[in-house]
Every structure is written in structure tokens, then in C-alpha cells.
Image: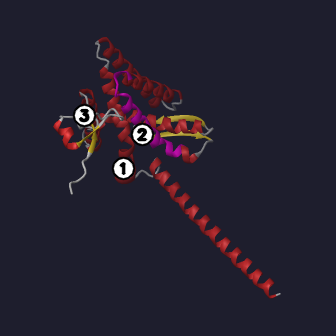
């Protein structure tokens, strides 16, 4: 018995297009690629892959890792801004944001949900990285991403607690504006997207690399990863204890009801 033919759409982009068997599709020289990539798509994906390799190499190589320091401070600023945003969204207040030269940061808040605020740093920076990478798919989106970075740096400067945080935000914002102006004057605005894409890739990888540094390589006891791990462990232990206590209480009540029923039955 001959096997049933494998059916494939003759035109992948039209869901209602007529179907052809695999052999007939090959005979008709039909493009069987599910996602045909243009030259821009290949350039976009190639840049993401190349930027990822460059960032990881510079991050783990002792002699040249200082080259990433300015952009690392931007990543830390967005990390701390994510804490501040979570505080505001959970009805808290932001007192100050601090970014240190030793690649540390601190966001001082009042009120809000501590669990959400604590977890928002890495989640927020990852969201920033993903949004910038996605925006740079189109040249106009790269400029929108650059504008979003300017707004974020302005917010960090507003809550800055210290000269380094304030001056760093102003200098990075000035460098971004200067690059934007030069690209516009030379008619190469796509270069803004290339730069923002590199920043997006670095910020996207920042969470993974920083957690590895804090928990594996450097073991920083005051980092978000360590604090969240401790609080998560405490929360899990408290939940297990509560469940066990509730189970013991229910078992005692069940035995008590059985004992009382047995007594009433005998009476």
C-alpha cells in the first residue's frame, strides 16, 4: 500500500491557498520555505548573533571588559528604573536611584509590593532589551528606541542620588543625541538603529550575565538575585509550613468529629 502523500501549501503566506502534494510541489519548483527571509532580515538576525558573541566575549574577558562599562552602567540604570516603575505601579513612592562605578545600583522606595519591586529589576531590564531589539527591526523603530532610551535616562537623572548617576545619565543622553544628529546630517539614520540594537542585545543579555556573576562567579550577597532567592526560599518554606499546619489541624478536627460521633452513637 502506497503511503499517503504529504500535503503542503503551494503559497505559505496565503492560508486559503490550494494544496499540492510534496512531490508535485517540488516538480512545480514551489518555494517550500515557511519564512522566506529578505536581505534586511538576514542582516538583522546576523547583527543580533554577532552582537551577542561580542557582548559575551567582552563580558567574560578580563582585559577588555572595561570597554562595556559605559553601556553596563546604562543597563544598571534601566534595571534600577524598572524597580522604580514597579514601585509606582504598586502604589509606592520612589525616593532615589543610585548607580555606582563598581557596577552596583540601589533604588530606594517607600511602600508598594516588595516581591514585585524586587523581581522587577531583571524582568524589566530583559523587557527593555527585548523591546529595543524588536524596535530595531525597522529603521524608524530604531529611532523610537533611541527616544525611549532618552526618556529613561531623563527619568534616572530626575531621581538620581549622587553626581555619578546624574552626570552619567546626562553624558549618555548627550552621546546618544550627538550620534543621532551626526547620523541625520550624513543621511545614515539606520546607524542609530544599529547602535540601539547593540544596546538592546547587551541589556537583554545583562540579566543572564549579571545573575551568573552574582550567584556563581562573584557571589554578591546583596544582589537582587540573592535576595530574591532568599525570600523565595522563605516564602516556599512558610507555604509548606502553613499547608502542613492546615493539614494537621484538619486531621485533628476530623478525628475529633469521629470521636464525638462515636460517643453520640454509643449514647
| Disc 3 element | helix
Residue 126 marker: 2
Mark 2 lies on a secondary structure that is helix
Q: Which residue is mark 3?
A: 46
Is the residue 136 above or below the residue 91 in the image? above
State the CA–CA distance, disc 2 to disc 3.
20 Å
- Residue situated furthest front in the rendering: 1
Quadrant of the snapshot with the C terminus:
bottom right
Closer-to-camera residue (180/1): 1
Q: Residue at x 62, y 38 (%)?
A: 92
State whether residue 145 appears in this view.
Answer: yes
Camera-near label (2 vs 3) is 3
Residue 244 is inside the magenta segment: no
Q: Whole-percent x and y of residue 236?
A: 54, 60
* Mark found first going from the N terminus, 1 or 3: 3
Query: Does residue 70 appear in the picture of this structure?
Result: no
Quarter of the figure with residue 168: top left
Earlier in the chain: of badge 2 and badge 3, it is 3
Q: Cβ–Cβ below 8 Å for labels 1 and 3?
A: no
Q: Nearer the viewer, mark 2 or mark 1?
A: 2
Stretch in magenta: 117-140
Is 123 part of what is drawn in magenta? Answer: yes
Q: Which one is in front in this view, the residue at disc 1 or the one at disc 3?
A: 3
Location of the N terminus (image quadrant): bottom left
Residue farthest to the bottom? 266
Q: CA distance from mark 1 to mark 3?
A: 25 Å
Determine which residue is flagged by label 1.
Answer: 212
Q: Which mark, residue 161?
A: none
Marks 2 and 1, Cα distance to the nearest angstrom?
15 Å
In depth, the one of 123 and 63 nearer the eye is 123
- Is 97 placed above or below 61 here? above
Amino acid at each position: 500500500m502506497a503511503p499517503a502523500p504529504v500535503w503542503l501549501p503551494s503559497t505559505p503566506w496565503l492560508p486559503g491557498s490550494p494544496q499540492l502534494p510534496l512531490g508535485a510541489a517540488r516538480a512545480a519548483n514551489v518555494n517550500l520555505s515557511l519564512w522566506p527571509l529578505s536581505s534586511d532580515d538576514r542582516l538583522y538576525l546576523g547583527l543580533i548573533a554577532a552582537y551577542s558573541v561580542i557582548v559575551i566575549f567582552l563580558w567574560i574577558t578580563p582585559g577588555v571588559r572595561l570597554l562595556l562599562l559605559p553601556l553596563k552602567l546604562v543597563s544598571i540604570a534601566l534595571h534600577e528604573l524598572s524597580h522604580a516603575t514597579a514601585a509606582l505601579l504598586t502604589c509606592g513612592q520612589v525616593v532615589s536611584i543610585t548607580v555606582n562605578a563598581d557596577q552596583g545600583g540601589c533604588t530606594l522606595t517607600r511602600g508598594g509590593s516588595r516581591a514585585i519591586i524586587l523581581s522587577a529589576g531583571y524582568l524589566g531590564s530583559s523587557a527593555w532589551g527585548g523591546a529595543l531589539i524588536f524596535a530595531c527591526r525597522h529603521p524608524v523603530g530604531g529611532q523610537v528606541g533611541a527616544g525611549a532610551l532618552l526618556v529613561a535616562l531623563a527619568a534616572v537623572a530626575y531621581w538620581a542620588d549622587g553626581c555619578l548617576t546624574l552626570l552619567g545619565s546626562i553624558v549618555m543622553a548627550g552621546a546618544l543625541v550627538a550620534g543621532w544628529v551626526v547620523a541625520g546630517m550624513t543621511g545614515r539614520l539606520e546607524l542609530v538603529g544599529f547602535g540601539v540594537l547593540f544596546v538592546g542585545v547587551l541589556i537583554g543579555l545583562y540579566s543572564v550575565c549579571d545573575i551568573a556573576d552574582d550567584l556563581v562567579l562573584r557571589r554578591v550577597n546583596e544582589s537582587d538575585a540573592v535576595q530574591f532567592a532568599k525570600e523565595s526560599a522563605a516564602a516556599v518554606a512558610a507555604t509548606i509550613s502553613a499547608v502542613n499546619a492546615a493539614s494537621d489541624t484538619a486531621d485533628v478536627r476530623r478525628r475529633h468529629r469521629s470521636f464525638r460521633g462515636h460517643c453520640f452513637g454509643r449514647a
